[in-house]
Amino acid sequence: MEPIVAGNWKMNKEPGESRALVQRLMELVGDYKDRLVILIPPFTSLPSIGELVRNSRMKLGGQNMHWERSGAYTGEISGFFLKAVGCEYVVIGHSERRHIMGETDDMINRKLRLALEIGLIPIFCIGETEKERESGKTETVIARQIKEGLKDIENEAHKIVFAYEPVWAIGTGKTATPRQAAEMHQYIRGMIKKPSTILYGGSVKPENIDSLMKQEEIQGVLVGGASLKPESFTRIIRFE
Ligand code: PGA
């Protein structure tokens, strides 16, 4: 499969800015072959971006979804709504949701199950904090996140895109070295057994994309900050 370059805009870009960014991206790399580009804008931009990319090679993803199909969950978004506006992907368990919004492995497991049930491809994020790495707990934490996250759906791991995102590398400018990332990817692959796509995320930028993508273990990237500017995101898509 072609390498994935996913851009998570987080809580940035109101609908007008989102459109402008995508229009520019389409001029620069709209029909770029050999890469699967996934745009993950805020919910309010999804309908209009969905229209823009409908006949292009770019794909659309949501940043989160609820574990129930519908109901009294004020402020939440149903996976069905994401599908209705053209999403094929959904990010689940992003570290900002785990650490700022208090999402637990159990909530993440329920979200993963529903996403698979309704035909959304989850981009399942896992990663250790700086403190956990320093105290030698990286593998224990990753193992727990995978085990709990995949509870009762272990056999469907091949339908999930994994994203290894060390928390200490997200938005900090500190990137895992290609070797550190490759080592963890190998560990994750060993745990999930089935062949799955594993992305790296955490301060991916034009300066480090080429060396990251040279690692055989890394099948793509999940980009935050550097996906907000058309020039830097384009350079990442065109990695060498
Ligand atoms: P960053 O974010 O590229 O800004 O570090 C990555 C992510 O949170 O997915």
Image (cartoon, grey):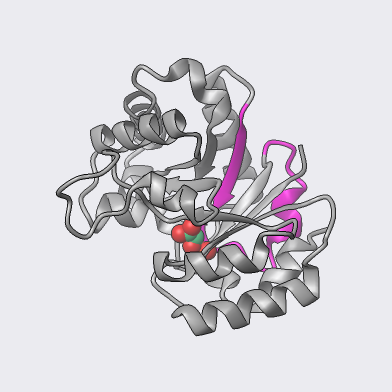
Percent of width and height locating residue 177: 61, 52
Q: Which residues are magenta?
A: 196-217
Q: Is residue 126 magenta?
A: no
Quadrant the C terminus occupies? bottom right
Which residue: 56% across, 46% down? Answer: 88
Q: Is residue 28 left or right of residue 47?
A: right
Residue nearest the observer in this picture, 141 or 229 = 229
Q: Is residue 103 above or below residue 51?
A: above
Percent of width and height locating residue 197: 63, 35
Percent of width and height locating residue 41: 49, 66
Residue nearest the observer in this picture, 110 or 94 = 110
Percent of width and height locating residue 159: 56, 28
Q: Is residue 231 left or right of residue 176?
A: right
Q: Is residue 161 above or below residue 158?
A: below
Quadrant the N terminus occupies? top right
Quadrant for residue 20, please give it: bottom right
